[in-house]
Amino acid sequence: MTFKGLATQVLMSRIEHAINSDKAASALDKLSSSGKGFDLADIVATFQGSGGDVARIAKSWLGDGANESISASQVQDTIGSRRVAAFAQALGMDLDAASEKLARILPELVDKSSQGGYLIDSIGKKSFLAGFTSRFLKKSA
């Protein structure tokens, strides 16, 4: 399973509008600034490059300590309201609801896919994926 596949499953478990994997994957692709599809490292770099509180918050997601929360408006401002709106539209949601969901999902998604402050380079390890999936989906239940 690819990381995008895993992120798609997480999205489907957390957002009722993500009713199938194609719809969820398409929505995730809308968040990328590169236009090459979903890339969590690109999203994290966007947060870190924004400076100030948002960069500090994103750093907490990568670290081993507690994750700081981010507001829906910070998500919109950092990722860009146009990209968040495209994400929302792909899921049939309004902009504010999508921003709120992303503010809840992104910190945990980044945290669970990072180790020692860096995003996992090779996520093909079965044990990592199995552990990640079970921990993430248990929290959503």
Image (cartoon, rainbow, N blue to C red):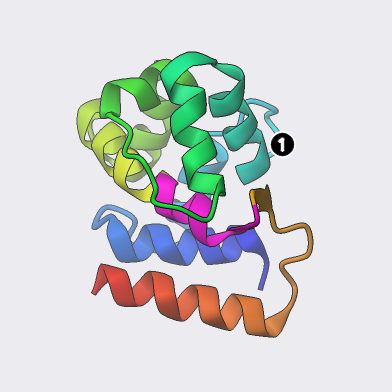
Q: Is residue 93 above or below residue 65?
A: above
Image position of 19 (left or right of 56): left
- Residue sitting nearer the eye, 132 or 3: 132
Residue 98 position by quadrant: top left
Image position of 122 (left or right of 51): right
Write the start and end of the magenta stretch as one range: 107-116
The answer, for residue 39, to whether it is visible in the render is no
Q: Is residue 37 above or below residue 17?
A: above
Most prominent secondary structure in the magenta stretch?
helix
- Residue sitting nearer the eye, 68 or 137: 68
Residue at position x 39%, y 51% from top? 66
The picture places residue 12, in percent across and down from the top left corner, at: 36, 62
Tag 1: residue type?
Answer: Lys
The picture places residue 49, in percent across and down from the top left corner, at: 61, 19
Q: Is residue 119 above or below residue 89?
A: below
* Magenta region includes residue 17: no
